[in-house]
């Protein structure tokens, strides 16, 4: 089954297939975003952790569309205070949503929401005809070998910007464990502190058998 992946900048993606999923909505204050918040109409919103540059527009979109936000338990409890629909999950758990499955994985990062503790950060493996791994904000970690062998993501969305996450070289180490045939870089060049070269990532990944698609903001990728 073909899925359509659209990068909105930073770590925010729309993934369209059986359903329309929006991940880590950071639009309004995102200096590279081109889409408008009111133009996004997901069936389900995934948030990997509570930091502003991943969760900033989640509540506003959920209120307007009625779509639930899926996040870890502690962050879900915070979102509930806004009167929106939520689905909670924790690492290792899987949620079925109208014919698609979303599994939470660990991520090595931190998480807070408006200064409040927001549980552990996560990544997600989404199965909607293609298996897609959104790593969230993370460094590489040994359990990526398990994600690679058990969840077998066909497409991995990986941060490469460094400083707060793994950099290009770290993302290559992640790919060695994940063994995804396709990778898409994210979380880079939004701000000066996370400057990275996606072409270098593409060239290095080719040496280990992974094809990297360098995304263009708002240009759909059909896979």
Image (cartoon, grey):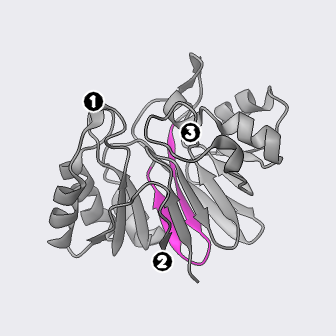
Crowding near the residue tagged with mark 2, few <14, some 14–19, many ≥20 C-alpha atoms within 10 Å: few
Look at 59% across and 58% down and name the residue there: 103
Along the viewing direction, whichever of 38 and 131 lies nearer the viewer: 38
* Mark earlier in primary sequence (1, 2): 1
Q: Residue at x 85, y 31 (%)?
A: 83
| Image coords of residue 26 (percent x, y) | 55, 38
Q: Residue furthest bottom?
A: 1
Question: For mark 2, what is the residue?
Answer: 223
Q: Nearer the viewer, residue 12 or 120?
A: 12
Q: How many numbered marks are there?
A: 3
Quadrant position of the N terminus in the picture: bottom right
Locate residue 17, reporting x and y percent: 64, 72
In the displayed structure image, the side of residue 6 where residue 138 appears, left or right:
left
Marked residue nearer the N-terminal end (1 or 3): 3
Q: CA distance from mark 1 to mark 2?
A: 31 Å
Circle number at residue 41? none
Q: Nearer the viewer, residue 187 or 103?
A: 187
Residue underneath mark 3: 27
Q: Please say whether residue 149 is one of the residues in the magenta stretch.
A: no
- Which residue is disc 1 drawn over? 193
Please tell me whether mark 3 sits on a helix, a strand or a loop: loop
| Res. 53 in view | yes
Question: Residue at image x 29%, y 48%?
Answer: 160
At mark 1, the secondary structure is: helix
Kindly tell me whether residue 51 is visible in this rendering.
no
- Could you tell me if the residues under marks 1 and 3 are in contact, i.e. CB atoms within 8 Å? no
> What span is in magenta?
121-135
Relative side of 8 to 173, left or right: right
- Marks 3 and 2, Cα distance to the nearest angstrom? 24 Å
């Amino acid at each position: 089954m073909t899925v359509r992946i659209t990068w909105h900048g930073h770590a925010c993606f729309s993934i369209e297939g059986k359903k329309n999923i929006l991940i880590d909505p950071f639009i309004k204050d995102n200096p590279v975003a081109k889409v408008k918040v009111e133009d996004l109409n997901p069936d389900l919103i995934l948030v990997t952790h509570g930091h502003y540059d991943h969760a900033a527009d989640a509540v506003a979109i959920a209120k307007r569309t009625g779509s639930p936000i899926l996040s870890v338990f502690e962050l879900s409890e915070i979102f509930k205070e806004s009167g929106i629909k939520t689905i909670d999950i924790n690492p290792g758990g899987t949620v079925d949503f109208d014919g698609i499955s979303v599994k939470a994985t660990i991520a090595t990062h931190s998480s807070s929401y408006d200064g409040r503790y927001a549980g552990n950060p996560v990544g997600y493996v989404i199965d909607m005809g293609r298996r897609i791994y959104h790593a969230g904000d993370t460094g590489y970690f040994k359990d990526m070998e398990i994600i690679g062998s058990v969840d077998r993501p066909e497409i991995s969305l990986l941060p490469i910007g460094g400083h707060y996450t793994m950099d290009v070289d770290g993302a290559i180490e992640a790919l060695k464990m994940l063994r995804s045939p396709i990778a898409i870089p994210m979380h880079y060049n939004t701000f000066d502190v996370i400057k990275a070269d996606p072409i270098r990532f593409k060239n290095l990944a080719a040496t280990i058998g992974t094809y990297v698609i360098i995304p263009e903001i708002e240009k759909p990728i059909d896979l």
